[in-house]
Image (tube, grey):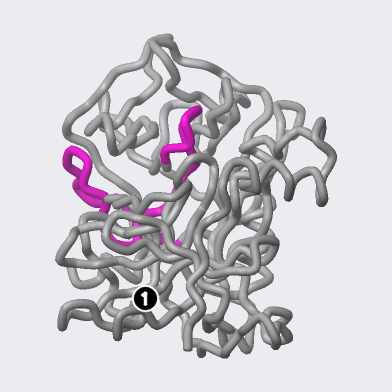
Amino acid sequence: MVNKVSPLSATQMAIWRGMWAYEDEPRLSRVARMRTMDRRDFLSGLKWVWACNGAVPSQALVGGKLDGQQYYIGRAHHQGSVTPGMVIPKRKACCIAWGGDEHDKDVYEVLCSDGRFVPVSERSTGNLLNASSAGISEDGEPLFIGLVQHEGKLICGKVQRSHGVCYIGYKGREMGFSEYQVFVGIAPTPLESHYWVMCDDSDSDVPAAATVAGSDTNGCLYIGRAGHRGSCTPGYISQATRKCHIAWGSDEHRKSRFEYLCNCRARFVPGRENFIPVGAVGGGYSEFGEPLFIGRVQVKNRYIVGKVQPTHKVCYIPYGGKVIAHAEYEILVLDDYTKSS
């Protein structure tokens, strides 16, 4: 029998924070949260693939069935969190539970790793020690993938250990359950994937595995990203300036501290509006936490790398000191997902 629990109220949350954390302790910054998330993803060995509008890769892990149709395990960014939930193709979204409500997110990641669900209850919580980290709360707490039985249906959601429950989104509401199953991934070997290397303009050497996006008269242009005004914005690194050029606001910004994209086996494919292809390479996030992707535009016989911002339906590139928006662009997609295109 599943024991349903109501989500914590604001008063209960205040009491909980008073018991477990200092009231004046600041939340983790977005940069710290994302770096923590990257580390946990690496350690968990789970493979996540970007997609949108209900699309899923062929390796997507089935979570169960709702109304006779399969749904898949996914996660999405929301209010500073990365929250596990369900990708429901019919709804063209990843459905997550957060803040008392169910939210549909049209840009999300899909789980493409094997694993199994093991039981957890108020009397037996040992299996939580083996659970695979799959998300992060707005306060930096790890989140896990949970599964509950409700009204004869198996529904995926997020497990937040400090709350002692698995939250699911159901009929527009967030619901909490103290008895649930938690996901344990099967990752026998570390995943080989792309990564980012931090550098600055004093470094004369380019990382050996840096990803080239194009070239100009001064040499290669590499894919990079840099922090600016609370964002982590993709752009290009020029050998001539030793800076990362990014588009933000209405101006081009040249950043002296930046990251190279490395070991990325991917190619640019035609993009359109706010459509994010399955397997798109995540490039960072906006100052509001929206995921950003890596795009490029050809200008005067060279390719300029910029940011694809789904809600704006364009690729912004830094050019001539300004930001230029392009409705027609290319977007970077992992090779494994472009072979059939």
The span shown in magenta is 265-290
Query: Residue shown at 45%/68% (left/top)?
Result: 157
How many marks do you count on the picture? Answer: 1
Q: Quadrant of the C terminus?
A: bottom left
Residue 219: percent from left, percent from top? 49, 33
Identify the residue at horizontal 52%, vertical 67% (top origin).
5
135, 300: nearer the viewer: 135
The one of 135 and 102 positioned closer to us in this rendering: 102
Left or right of residue 291, residue 129 in this image: right
Q: Nearer the viewer, residue 42 or 266?
A: 42
| Residue that mark 1 sits on | 155
Does 270 sit left or right of 165 as displayed?
Answer: left
Give coordinates of residue 272: x percent, y percent: 17, 42
Is residue 234 among the parts visible in the rendering? no
Task: Please name the residue shown 19% across and 67% down the image.
Answer: 89
Q: Position of residue 136 (x, y in %)?
A: 60, 55
Residue 132 higher or lower than 137, as above or below:
below
Quarter location, residue 255: top right
Query: Mark 1 falls on what kind of element?
Result: strand
Amino acid under label 1? Ile
Residue 6 in the image: x percent, y percent?
50, 61
In the depicted structure, whether residue 67 falls above or below residue 308:
below
Residue at x 53% of width, y 38% of height:
224
